[in-house]
Image (cartoon, rainbow, N blue to C red):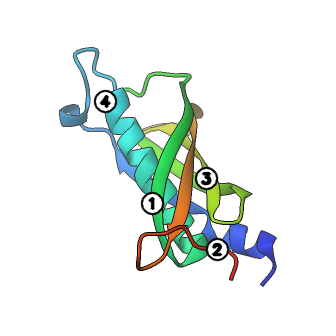
Amino acid sequence: MTLEDKITASETRIFKAVFPNTTNHYDTLFGGTAMHMMDEVAFITATRFSRQIMVTVSSDRIDFKKPIPAGTIVELVGRVSHIGNTSLKVSVEIFIEQMYSEHRERAVTGEFSFVAIDENKKPTSILK
């Protein structure tokens, strides 16, 4: 399997409904909740790519472009964007979909960095 094939195969898509218990007093998704969901999708993507123990080491520039209202569906898409020796980066996008129309738009983007670790919690090579 080529590297590009591994990247394509590890792309992760998760859909969630935005319910009132995840929103703030403006009836939009809490930013921290969005970041939590993004980190989870990024972790799954990194793990599916490497099939190793992966840990988050940083999140880079999370851009909240649009508020995410209650009563919408969100799709989170994670894709490996950079591969190093022991680390990789995953870009994550959140798209808003209206429940009762075809309207869809990108709301949030961000990038998360992960390191592969061995049984002694030491960094290990991603591409073995």
Foreground disc of the pair 2, 3: 2
Label 4 environment density (alpha carbons within 10 Å; few <14, some 14–19, many ≥20): some
Q: CA distance from mark 2 to mark 3?
A: 17 Å
Looking at the image, is mark 1 or mark 3 earlier in the sequence?
A: 1
Amino acid type of disc 2?
Ser
Looking at the image, is mark 4 or mark 1 earlier in the sequence?
A: 1
Label 3 environment density (alpha carbons within 10 Å; few <14, some 14–19, many ≥20): many
Q: Residue at x 64, y 58 (%)?
A: 88
Amino acid type of disc 1?
Val
Q: Are marks 2 and 3 in contact (CB under 8 Å)?
A: no
Q: Residue at x 71, y 68 (%)?
A: 8
Q: Residue furthest left?
A: 21
Q: Residue 109 at x, y = what percent? A: 58, 35
Q: CA distance from mark 3 to mark 4?
A: 27 Å
Q: CA distance from mark 4 to mark 1?
A: 31 Å
Amino acid type of disc 3?
Val
Q: CA distance from mark 1 to mark 3?
A: 12 Å
Looking at the image, is mark 2 or mark 4 earlier in the sequence?
A: 4
- Residue linked to disc 1: 55
Foreground disc of the pair 1, 3: 1
Foreground disc of the pair 1, 2: 2
- Residue linked to disc 3: 90
Foreground disc of the pair 2, 4: 2
Looking at the image, is mark 2 or mark 3 earlier in the sequence?
A: 3
Q: Is residue 126 above or below residue 16?
A: below
Label 2 environment density (alpha carbons within 10 Å; few <14, some 14–19, many ≥20): some
In this rendering, would 124 be left or right of 41? right
- Residue linked to disc 2: 125
- Residue linked to disc 4: 70
Q: Residue 121 at x, y = what percent? A: 42, 70
Q: CA distance from mark 1 to mark 2?
A: 13 Å
Q: Residue at x 33, y 23 (%)?
A: 28
